[in-house]
Image: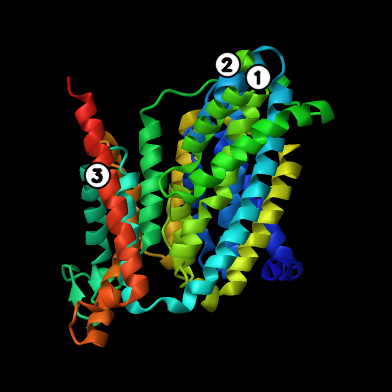
Amino acid sequence: MTGFIDSLTNLASLWVVVAAFAGVLWGILGGALPGISPSIAMALLLPFTVGMDPTIAIVLLASVYVGAEYGGSIPAILIRTPGTNSASATVIDGYEMARQGRAGEALGISLMSGMWGGLFGLLVLVLATESLAKVALAFTPAAYFSLGILGLSVIAGLSGGSLLRGLITACIGLMIAFIGSDPVSGVPRFTFGSADLLGGIKPILIMVGLFAVTEMLVQIGEPAWAKASKSEARLKLPNWAMSKRLFKPQAIGAAIGTFEGVTPGAGGTVAAFMAYSEAKRWSKKPEEFGHGSPEGIAAPESANNVVTATALVPLLSLGIPGSNSAAILLGGFLIHGLQPGPMLFEKAPEVVWGLYGGLLFANIAMLLIGLVILSPCIWLVNRPKPYLIAFILALVMSGVYAIHQSIFEVGIVLAVGVLGYGMRLLRLPVLPLVLGLVLGYLVESNYRRSLLISGGEHSIFLTDKVSLGLLITAFALTAYTGWKEFSASKGKKP
């Protein structure tokens, strides 16, 4: 906690504050566009963070995550179209309040619930990761290998109910990770004689292609969303009596968001719907839910904004991205030569504490910007969809080209976008591919190093206590998920 307090004094840097406000502004605008998820809004900025100071770049990306979660509630309330997946639960009562002429009140409840949820999630993040930092020095190459195996075992929970589909896409990610030079001998492999592939395929190219280009290809075939009325662009913050009524659902959302956030694969959507259900269960006025209940907005909005911080716990402590947005943030770390995980707290503690301070500013910025952003958001939602898609694709291509001025990398992004579109059609999950890509090097390089240390003895992975514990956990997680999937498949049979 002392490091967090010290970081606030160091955040007097104007650029860090600017990054937090700019990220939230971009995130709200991106979240307000139906179909543009937080991860896509982050991916669009990812190429432009190359060359930035690491702390500023990470704060910028994390702030986009914060802003997009709130921005998704704006079209959910106004036009019954959630801007993000996690805002789907907000539609139920938010749109009903808008139909009753209470759109401004609904937007105010969403804003305040999101801010309090974000601040609570930040507190959990600081307390949880600071304690985990103490185990950093216990990680050997064998432990890092087992940590990578644990990360790959999470694929089972990120596969959308099909372990086989998750394994297929994870293998694709591992295959991409092995392109380039061997991490120990330096021998080129899978480069097909191309000098452009000697350094491997950068994760940033895969992430931008999978999240941004793929989504634009999907949106081309989707109908245009509804238009919003400018007369609804008046926000009304809850008064003291309403704030007291909303405390319980906000607390329920915060508790569920904390649990779901630290669980890889759960994410804000699951947290929002669970919070909505529990808030209705414990409400004194459950009959209002579905008919314009303020509590039906407060609970899911609190939950999905808590997740923006708590989802970073497994990323920072273990290097495992548990959501699409966390995977994009992982890409931001990798661009600047930083590997999230236990040693991050030893090698670059200033970046970690800078991220915490940046998230604090981001939640404050969300409140300030949220008070004045409605009119621009409504104008943006009402633009012709083809123009918006063309603008976003142009932004992606210019950003990717600006990294190394390479047409070859632009081609990779476009090819990955087509690959992602095919995966959507086949209902293959994206996140296992990202996990395989970012964990492939960690697993292979530390496996080889461990065998060099032990003289080729695989027993090193069992004699190392940390490694053994991680392997047991990975096996237990995989077995549990496999058993649960098997039981579900048996239950579906007549």
Q: Position of residue 422 (x, y in %)?
A: 25, 40
49 sits left or right of 334 in the view: right
SS of the residue under disc 2:
loop
Front position in the image: 214 or 445: 445
Q: Nearer the viewer, mark 2 or mark 3?
A: 3
Q: Are marks 2 and 1 in contact (CB under 8 Å)?
A: yes
Q: Position of residue 267 (x, y in %)?
A: 47, 43
Q: Which residue is mark 3?
A: 482
Q: Which mark is residue 16?
A: none
Q: Which residue is mark 1?
A: 293
SS of the residue under disc 1:
loop
Q: Is residue 150 above or below residue 213?
A: below
Q: Which residue is mark 2?
A: 290
Q: Position of residue 255 (x, y in %)?
A: 59, 42
Q: Amino acid at mark 3?
A: Gly
Name the residue located 46 percent from the left edge and 37 percent from the top edge. Answer: 389
Q: Amino acid at mark 2?
A: Gly
Residue 144 makes an appearance in the image: no
Mark 3 and mark 1: Cα distance apart in space: 39 Å
Task: State the count of labels.
Answer: 3
Name the residue located 56 percent from the left edge and 63 percent from the top edge. Answer: 129
Q: Nearer the viewer, mark 3 or mark 1?
A: 3
For the C terminus, the quadrant is: top left
Q: Is residue 449 above or below residue 443?
A: below
Mark 2 and mark 1: Cα distance apart in space: 7 Å
Front position in the image: 129 or 112: 129
